[in-house]
Image (spheres, rainbow, N blue to C red):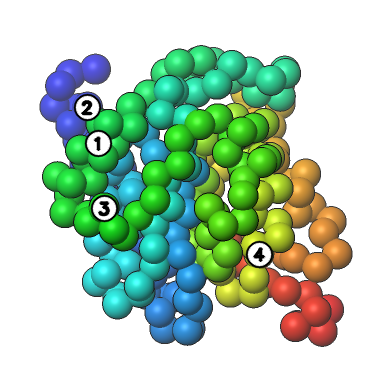
Amino acid sequence: MASTDVFDQSLQEHVWRRQFFYNAFKALAYNGIDGDYAEFGCWGGLTFSIAYAESRRHRHRATLWAYDSFQGLPPAADERDVHPIWVEGTLSTTLAQFHELCAEKGIPSSEYHAVPGFYSQTLDRAAEDKAPRNIALAYIDCDLYSSTLSVLRFLMPRLKHGMIIAFDDYFCWTATQISGERRAMLDVFGNHERWQLLPFMQFGWHGQSFVVEDRTIMGA
């Protein structure tokens, strides 16, 4: 692929994500949904910086949380994690690099928390005083089924009516199976008694977002 093609693709993906975050934080502010922003998978820092900029544009005072191994993708837990593009150790941004990227984008260190480590350690065993209790927008970009499942289990007791959940790699699959984030979402929310997901906005060819709805509020 020519260098200009790579640049054009990167620019287009930036536009897609910025449009999503503009609409998401506008909707949250308009509808009075307060809370923090939690990102799961922070490679490159770009999405995190866009989320910060758009939250401030719409006067949504979210504290930002960055959850990532900062060591790249973990090894596949089982066959459900297998995908030709998702390779152990790729998509790696170190914690020091992430802090540098945030500083370059003008994100004050006082307005975000970076939580390093694989999710089996940082989410499955999260201390309540070191985790967000009120989340308005969760952005899931961790690719693997097992990682996404850990994220959704972490979010389950924190779900609330009106929050938004976005899956960056929702439209990913292989020739033999549904993959990654969509498969985990279906397993968790497919027939949930309380929570249902209302499609909100697709971004790019790969991403899909949802508004969380509480069936008990809706009378369903």
Residue at the spot of label 3: 109
Residue at the spot of label 4: 159
Q: Can residue 202 be seen in the rendering of this structure? A: no
Residue at the spot of label 2: 6
Q: Are marks 1 and 2 in contact (CB under 8 Å)?
A: yes
- Crowdedness of circle 4 by 10 Å Cα count: few (<14), some, many (20+)? many
Q: In screen coordinates, is 178 left or right of 98?
A: right
**Dot label at residue 10:** 1
Disc 1 marks a residue whose amino acid type is: Ser
Q: Can residue 163 be seen in the rendering of this structure? A: yes
**Secondary structure beneath disc 2?**
helix
Q: What's the residue at 40%, 44% (across, down)? A: 114
**Secondary structure beneath disc 3?**
helix
Distance, label 3 to label 4, CA atoms, is 26 Å
Distance, label 1 to label 4, CA atoms, is 32 Å
Q: In screen coordinates, is 69 left or right of 76?
A: left
Distance, label 4 to label 2, CA atoms, is 37 Å
- Crowdedness of circle 2 by 10 Å Cα count: few (<14), some, many (20+)? few
Q: In screen coordinates, is 189 left or right of 180?
A: right
First-in-chain label (1 vs 4): 1
Question: Is 170 situated above or below 1?
Answer: below
Residue 136 drawn at (x, y percent): 50, 67
Question: Is 11 situated above or below 3?
Answer: below
Q: Are marks 1 and 3 in contact (CB under 8 Å)?
A: no
- Crowdedness of circle 3 by 10 Å Cα count: few (<14), some, many (20+)? few
Q: What's the residue at 18%, 46% (across, down)? A: 103
Eye-nearest disc, 1 or 4: 4
**Secondary structure beneath disc 4?**
loop
Disc 2 marks a residue whose amino acid type is: Val
Residue 166 drawn at (x, y percent): 51, 53
